[in-house]
Amino acid sequence: MPKELIFAVEDELHIQQLIKYNLESAGYRVFTFESGESLLKEVKNTIPDLFILDIMLPGIDGLEICRQLRQNPRTKTVPVIMLTAKSEEFDKVLGLELGADDYMTKPFSVRELVARVKAMFRRMTNAAPTESEIITFGDITIDCTRREVTKGETLLELPLKEFELLKLLILNKGKVLSRDLLLEKIWGFDYYGETRTVDVHIRYLRQKIEDDDSNPVYIETIRGIGYRFNDKGAK
Ligand code: CA
């Protein structure tokens, strides 16, 4: 089986080498880039299995790279992990238009980065085969094979994690799922993130699937516990 290919852009050479060395030791193939321009140029020839994007770069920054990758049909579903300098960038990074799948705040532990990468690939492997099913609920349809979600006639652009989250909630409709459980199932057991990650993704998911996201019908908040996909459907 060919090893998964990772493209990482990072202008600080010692961090770049650290990323490359540790991910290669973990069995991945890693191409590193010092600028977004060089990464985007290479993407015209080769599509990797995962991107790691530093935000602060000379030239175009990681946010703009992510935006461009999401607009490109060939890269729009490839997972993206962002490296951010400040935790305030959290919302922006996981945000609607950007759709990164995960982020790490600098300084970060390389061991943790490797764990996140592994968790990401594990999710993809688990999600990919055998699920030829189409799940429908109310005006929402999830096509697991094509990894597409439609609301009515509208095709929704859902990043990987939002897709997984919606699928898990619908498959367990009527049941309360705790934030910890969602974090473990969607981000992997060795994900050291906070449960706030779940809340942020739920917020973005609601903006896409609810008619009025300030008055959600599909995804209910169960105070102090987590979330439930309402099996009674639209009111
Ligand atoms: Ca940098």
Image: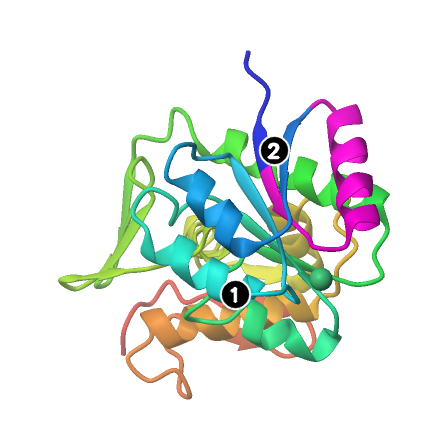
28 to 235, vertically: above or below: above
Q: Residue at x 51, y 47 (%)?
A: 38
Residue 231 position by quadrant: bottom left
42 to 103, vertically: above or below: above
In the rendered image, residue 31 lying in the magenta stretch gets the answer no
Please identify the quadrant where the N terminus is shown: top right
* Range drawn in magenta: 7-27
Q: Residue at x 68, y 35 (%)?
A: 118
The residue closer to the viewer here, 103 or 169, is 103
Residue that protrudes farthest toward the left in the picture: 153
Residue 147 drawn at (x, y percent): 34, 43
Residue 73 as seen in the image, left or right of residue 51 = left
- Quick one: SS at disc 2? helix
- Find the distance from the CA under tag 1 to the CA under tag 2: 31 Å
What secondary structure predominates along the stretch shown in magenta? helix
Residue underneath mark 1: 60
Residue 86 drawn at (x, y percent): 74, 74
Residue 52 as seen in the image, left or right of residue 38 = right
Residue 207 drawn at (x, y percent): 39, 76
Residue 196 position by quadrant: bottom right
Which disc is residue 31 wearing?
Answer: none
In the rendered image, residue 10 lying in the magenta stretch gets the answer yes
The residue closer to the viewer here, 119 or 17, is 17
Residue type at numbered disc 2: Arg
Residue underneath mark 2: 122
Q: Is mark 1 within 8 Å of ligand 1?
A: no
Residue type at numbered disc 1: Ile
